[in-house]
Image (tube, grey):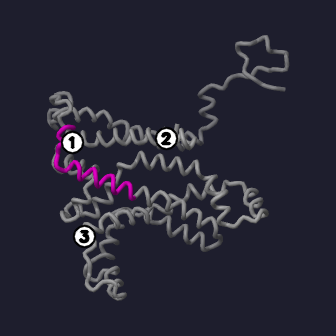
Amino acid sequence: MKKVNVPDHPQLLGKGVTQTKSVSGWKRFMGQWEFQVMIWPALLFLLIFSYGPMWGIFIAFQDYNLFAGVKNSPWVGFMHFRMFFESPEFWSVMRNTFAISLLKLCIGFPAPIILALMLNEVAGKFKRVVQTVTYVPHFMSWIVISGLVFSMLAVDNGAVNELLIALNLIHEPVNWMSTPEYFWGILVSLNVWKEIGFGSIVYLAAIIGIDPAQYESASIDGASRFQQIFRITIPNIMPIMMIFLILGIGNILNAGYEDILVLTKNLSNGIVLPVADVIDTYVYQMGIVNQRFSYATAAGLFKSLLSVTLLVVANTLARKFGKTSLW
């Protein structure tokens, strides 16, 4: 017998339809308490540390004084935004931000997909070893990674220089970390190496969820493994790929903070700083080091608004042409 909610249609009773009581919000909450326990700590963390401080964006429109506070600091309108746009560092900071972010997106986006496709083709102990080796860097702090990098790329007795000299590829040691031409490549390579394994987890889970009957049918029809990858695997994980691509585009202005900070030794390496300074490090320098709080907030707010705009545009285009979107 069919069950529907008929609180406003009593005439339906007795005609093959039975009335069911609506479940209250509290009962629904208690029925899902395991999921609530998992989601609420993360939600509270987000509300407290991400949304809570957002009231501070008002100081971007003030000449904020730490001792006067928000209420007593004078309002200056868009003065700090104009100062940021007219500053001599603006174009170099924007260039570095977009260049580093685009490199990370162009290389870091397909890398986990390729790794997941490769791991899906192997099995046994080798697969588990590769997964473990590629997952571990994600849990390493940038402090540890920077120590390893500076040791390996050191001018004196650095492993990379010693190897290249032994292979006669170079004739004298190269100061990799103080050469601007190499900084972007080192930074992007480290980011890809650090996140490729962890990023492949979602794609591996999506691949495992594909119906095996599709592969069996393709094998019967004579499809090779490469044909199965391009005709079955990739189309099935395409929605997830589009979601991550949209998020990556929305995150394109987050070129990095911790990695650049430690690789430039707290921005003290003036040789590579012209190619390393991005919006986040510029905000850190202006706000924390120089204590220009309103100016730094204006620069950070500009980055946030531009990121939201890019996210909305990317989502709109994906929904229109790819039929996959965040909302």
Report, in whole angstroms, how far the alpha carbon at label 1 lies from the one at label 2.
29 Å
Camera-side mark, 3 or 2: 2
Q: Which tag, 3 or 2, sits closer to the chain's start?
A: 3
Q: Residue at x 25, y 63 (%)?
A: 264
Label 1 neighbour load within 10 Å: few <14, some 14-19, many 20+: few
Estimate the x, y position of residue 53 in percent, counting from the top left. Answer: 32, 37
Q: Residue at x 20, y 41 (%)?
A: 295
Label 3 neighbour load within 10 Å: few <14, some 14-19, many 20+: few
Report, in whole angstroms, how far the alpha carbon at label 3 lies from the one at label 2.
39 Å
Asked if disc 3 and disc 2 are in contact, CB closer than 8 Å, the reply is no
User: Residue 85: which disc?
Assistant: 1
User: Residue 317: which disc?
Assistant: 2
Q: Residue at x 58, y 48 (%)?
A: 239
Vertical placement of residue 143 versus 165, above or below? above
Provide the residue designation for mark 3: 179
Q: Where are the magenta residues, as a range? A: 81-103
Main secondary structure along the magenta-highlighted residues: helix
Dividing the picture into quadrants, the one containing residue 100 is bottom left
Estimate the x, y position of residue 235 in percent, counting from the top left. Answer: 63, 53
93 falls in the magenta region: yes
Vertical placement of residue 175 versus 171, above or below? above
170 falls in the magenta region: no
Q: Quadrant where the N terminus lies?
A: top right
Q: Residue at x 50, y 63 (%)?
A: 197
Camera-side mark, 1 or 2: 2
Relative depth, front residue between 209 and 135: 209
Vertical placement of residue 276 versus 40, above or below? below
Q: Which tag, 3 or 1, sits closer to the chain's start?
A: 1
